[in-house]
Image (tube, rainbow, N blue to C red):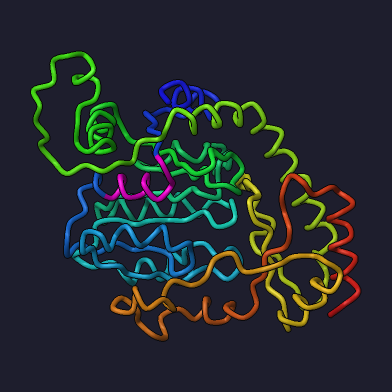
């Protein structure tokens, strides 16, 4: 596991300590604990993301404040973020949807002004860059996911980047039941646990898979970016279709998802399915889940409301050929 952490940091050119975990959700929960969030604190999060971003906040009674999305990227709407800040706000969690980095300069400007912690959910964004900086070198905490269908997989797993070695030492204890494993294995542990810990350690079997996957990561990123570009060239001018995350030249897309917003979505889904092309939504707005009902403010999410019945994720993975993507585009260009 140590070898995987070190190789991952070297390969991505990360400047801070990394900790491998059993899942990306574990890594996010660790970030919430390490950043000192407590019951009653408010945290601003995207209304549109995997529930794994937000459910760990419920473990500690943290007050969730859902922010709307940008209609062109489905990332955080920072105008809404500004309106949500209160004296109880302690952190902003941003998700780089589909692999396109959020507006990190603005997020940090807001966070610095109000003394907030920025936590990046980069589950989609391994290898992405914002204004030349690799995602993972910008904020105090960044989480990556190695779940089964991510760019790099360990079957399931995650990685957390933390700000300094002191934080990393504490995180290693919390990651393993609160036990100082180095001291224990060195024979000088005093057989005490001083804070609540969890079983969030990555197994060595998973880490071995991760090391093997790192050998292919550059090729995987290149393949996804090539396929993404073919989609953009072919679908850019299709009537009734908007490409999500198009033409942001100050950042480099990791290309985990290819998302469009379309008129008559179900008609397009049906047409694609008829020729054995899968499409879907992947993520779902979190304010629709009953578990988050206490944190929902109806009418606060107009951009999400407008896209709810329009966004659609098209196939994008390393088993696709250029010709496969061309066939998807041909099908779409013929209308639905």
Left or right of 178 on screen, residue 9: right
- Is 295 drawn above or below residue 252 in the view shown? below
Q: Viewer-proximal residue, 323 or 232?
A: 323
At a point 44% along the width and 78% down the height, the residue shown is: 288
Q: Can you see residue 131?
A: no
Q: Position of residue 27 (x, y in %)?
A: 37, 44
Q: Can residue 26 be found in the magenta stretch?
A: yes
At a point 52% along the width and 37% down the height, the residue shown is: 133
Q: Can you see residue 72?
A: yes
- What are the residue bounds of the magenta stretch? 22-32
Q: Position of residue 300 (x, y in %)?
A: 41, 81
What is the quadrant of the N terminus in the image?
top left
Splitting the image into 4 quarters, where does residue 222 fall? top right
Q: Viewer-proximal residue, 178 or 309?
A: 178
Left or right of 327 on screen, residue 127: left
Q: Main secondary structure of the magenta part?
A: helix
- Is 96 drawn above or below residue 197 in the view shown? below
Q: Position of residue 80 (x, y in %)?
A: 40, 71
At a point 13% along the width and 41% down the height, the residue shown is: 195
């Amino acid at each position: 596991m140590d070898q995987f952490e070190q190789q991952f940091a070297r390969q991505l050119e990360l400047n801070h300590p990394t900790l491998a975990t059993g899942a990306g959700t574990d890594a996010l929960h660790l970030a919430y604990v390490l950043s000192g969030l407590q019951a009653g604190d408010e945290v601003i999060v995207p209304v549109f993301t995997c529930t794994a971003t937000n459910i760990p906040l419920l473990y500690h009674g943290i007050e969730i404040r859902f922010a709307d999305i940008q209609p062109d990227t489905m990332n955080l709407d920072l105008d809404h973020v500004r309106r949500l800040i209160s004296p109880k706000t302690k952190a902003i969690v941003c998700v780089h949807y589909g692999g396109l980095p959020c507006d990190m300069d603005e997020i940090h400007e807001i966070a610095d002004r109000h003394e907030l912690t920025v936590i990046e959910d980069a589950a989609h964004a391994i290898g992405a860059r914002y204004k030349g900086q690799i995602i993972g070198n910008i904020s105090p905490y960044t989480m990556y996911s190695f779940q089964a269908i991510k760019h790099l997989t360990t079957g399931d797993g995650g990685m957390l980047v933390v700000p300094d070695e002191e934080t990393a030492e504490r995180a290693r204890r919390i990651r393993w039941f609160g036990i100082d494993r180095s001291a224990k294995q060195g024979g000088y542990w005093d057989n005490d646990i001083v804070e609540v810990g969890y079983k969030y350690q990555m197994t060595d079997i998973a880490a071995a898979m991760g090391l093997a996957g790192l050998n292919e990561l550059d090729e995987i990123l290149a393949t996804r970016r090539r396929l993404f570009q073919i989609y953009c060239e072919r679908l850019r001018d299709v009537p009734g279709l908007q490409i999500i995350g198009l033409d942001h030249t100050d950042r480099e897309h990791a290309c985990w998802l290819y998302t469009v917003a379309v008129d008559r979505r179900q008609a397009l889904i049906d047409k694609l399915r008829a020729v054995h092309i899968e499409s879907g939504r992947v993520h779902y707005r979190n304010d629709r889940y009953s578990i988050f009902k206490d944190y929902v403010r109806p009418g606060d999410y107009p951009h999400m409301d407008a896209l709810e019945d329009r966004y659609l994720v098209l196939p994008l993975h390393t088993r696709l050929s250029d010709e496969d993507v061309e066939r998807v585009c041909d099908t779409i260009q013929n209308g639905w």
